Image (cartoon, helix red, strand yellow):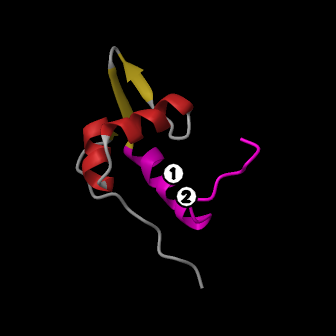
Amino acid sequence: MGVERITVDIDHEWLSVSDICDYMGVSAFVVTRMLRSGDLAAVKMGREWRVARIDFEEWLNVERARGGRRDPRS
């Protein structure tokens, strides 16, 4: 039996670091670190990061499916 897919209920297509922090309850440092490392796909416009909502949803679902475990080789 599969787990129901997470859908992010935010009314805009591009999310800011602040949007993700609010949604996940984490600090800007945590989100920015993930963006810089490439763990979460994003674009940088000047000094601001933006994440497509669909990419954030996909990342959440992949992370949940693998239990947040990381490949030790990466």
Q: For residue 38, which quarter of the picture?
A: top right
Residue occupying image coordinates x 33% and y 54%? 24
Q: Is residue 6 magenta?
A: no
- Against 8, residue 38 (above or below) is above
Q: What element carries label 2?
A: helix
Residue occupying image coordinates x 71% and y 51%? 71
Residue 23 lies, in percent from the top left, at 28, 54
Q: Is residue 65 left or right of residue 49?
A: right
Front-lying residue, 19 or 67: 67
What residue sits right under mark 2 in the picture? Answer: 63
Q: For residue 45, which quarter of the picture?
A: top left
Answer whether labels 1 and 2 touch (C-beta < 8 Å). Answer: yes
Q: Given the current orientation, which residue lies at the most extreme right position?
A: 73
Q: Which mark is residue 20?
A: none
- Against 60, residue 16 (above or below) is above
Residue 31 lies, in percent from the top left, at 39, 40
Residue 32 lies, in percent from the top left, at 40, 33
Q: Is residue 40 visible?
A: yes
Q: Given the current orientation, which residue lies at the most extreme top position?
A: 46
Which amino acid type corresponds to the residue marked 1 in the rendered image? Trp
Q: Can residue 15 be seen in this view?
A: no
Give the magenta range. 53-74
Q: In this view, does 34 lie to the left or right of 11?
A: right
What residue sits right under mark 1 in the picture? Answer: 59
Q: Is residue 36 left or right of residue 20?
A: right
Q: Is mark 1 on a helix, strand or loop?
A: helix
